[in-house]
Amino acid sequence: MNTVDIITKKRDGISLTTEEIRFLVDGYTAGDIPDYQMAAFLMAVFFKGMDRGETVCLTECMRDSGDVVDLSGVKGIKVDKHSTGGVGDKTTLIVGPIASACGVPIAKMSGRGLGFTGGTVDKLESIPGFRTSMEESEFIDQVNTRGIAVIGQTGHIAPADKKIYALRDVTGTVENLSLITSSIMSKKLAAGSDAILLDVKCGRGAFMKTEEEAVQLAQLMVDIGNDSGKKTMAVISDMEQPLGRAVGNSLEVMEAIDVLKGQGPEDITQLSLELAGIMVYLSQVAGTEGLCMEDGIAKGREAAGQALADGRALQRFCSFVEGQGGDPKITEDPGLLPQATLSATVKAERDGFITSLDAMAIGIASQHTGAGRQRKEDAIDLSAGTVLNAKRGDKVCAGDVLCTLYGNDETKLKTASEEAAKAFAIDDNVPEERKLIKRIIG
Ligand code: URA
């Protein structure tokens, strides 16, 4: 087989065979195919697309490029949750403990963030003492004893995706349906859970800008998950403005704790309960056993709400943190989390209603504070980030604080404030409401 032939075939819009896709993936992972040929192939896929069969094949080849985790030592139906990414999305820190408190075994591997702020692993590492790496046996043991463990994804999970994703990132080939699907699903299928819930974001802060694009992506991922024997569902949720009010690692941990205490922002609380409810249904626990999807999700949502209201979810969070070496006292004293030494504010220049709050601009501003990485080897400032004092639809007066930026570098904060100011649009009329949860695909 010849790499050039495969590239030209795809360039001409012809479907590739299983053998050809495997040849490319295996060859690139092993270092036999150079970056420039893989980049040309990815660009051909970007323009010509892949059909469903090719996408399934690419997903399976990337899954098989590394370890497939064996979670059979964990009792019950394990449910994984994945978000396609957004600004201020700290739902794993909330949904995991809620679902776990309802009886869903959570054995999760999460990533670091290359985007505007850290990923779940970075956020967890802002908790003093928290360990995000564990031996497999300890990981499984913690899930069986405490109901939840979250660790960093190892390089042995879908190494082909790791290499290809890094190349896509620098060759303008990220935003393609088949490439995103195979990238996400190869890792999810390798992570060993029995069921998968995908939170597919749409809006200005997401890969998918429109609901239609998000539905297409979600449907393809759901189909591939189900075809591979994992019960898979997706929620389409809004990412036009940041989720919650905090963006940045320790700031997001603090907000997650507020939500678990029942004192968090309404949007993230609502989305977390919805996601946790679906996970309860997928895991067939808390009275959802044998119910149809609609009734099962309703029952799951109710169970999730109870676990939040009676404090079991917060207790579960403390137990989870303690199990991984972190200090559970952060729930009583957020001052134990990394704190920034400097802050700056952005103020409203006129009276009116916030008609739009651009998630992407807040993401970029937060990255400038030091909360995110520009390159994967960059260090993150765990204390830095943005807190939104006002959100879309809020009425403000000239001089009101719209957001507060935190960090440890005066120059960075100044740039961040200038970026954050671009995020807000203020006008005379109340903006039309945007639905947070747009659709469920099962
Ligand atoms: N997240 C991933 O893991 N892969 C993509 O391609 C896009 C988002």
Image (tube, rainbow, N blue to C red):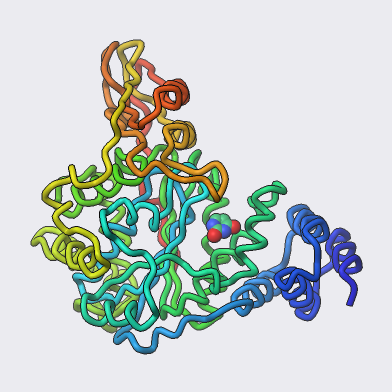
Q: Is residue 332 above or below residue 136?
A: above
From the viewer's side, name the closer residue of 320 and 200. 320
From the viewer's side, name the closer residue of 340 and 332. 340
Q: Is residue 94 above or below residue 408?
A: below
User: Where residue 191 sits: x, y (%)?
Assistant: 47, 75
Q: Is residue 114 above or below residue 287?
A: above
In this rendering, does residue 254 appear at all?
yes
In this rendering, does residue 424 appear at all?
no
From the viewer's side, name the closer residue of 226 and 326. 326
Q: Is residue 235 above or below residue 388?
A: below
* Residue 199 horizontal side relative to residue 378, left or right: left
> Residue at position x 80%, y 72% from top?
16
Q: Name the quadrant containing residue 288.
A: bottom left
Q: Name the quadrant containing residue 64.
A: bottom right
* Residue 431 horizontal side relative to residue 213, left or right: left
Taking the image as four quarters, which one is ligand 1 found in?
bottom right
User: Where residue 162 sits: x, y (%)?
Assistant: 60, 63
> Residue at position x 49%, y 47% from top?
202
Q: Quadrant of the C terminus?
A: bottom left
* Residue 171 horizontal side relative to residue 217, left or right: right
Residue lying furthest left = 310
Q: Quadrant of the N terminus?
A: bottom right
From the viewer's side, name the closer residue of 15 and 40. 40
User: Where residue 295 sits: x, y (%)?
Assistant: 27, 71
User: Where residue 298 sits: x, y (%)?
Assistant: 25, 66
> Residue at position x 55%, y 41% from top?
374
> Residue at position x 28%, y 45% from top?
267
* Residue 32 horizontal side relative to residue 269, left or right: right
- In this figure, what is the number of numbered marks? 0
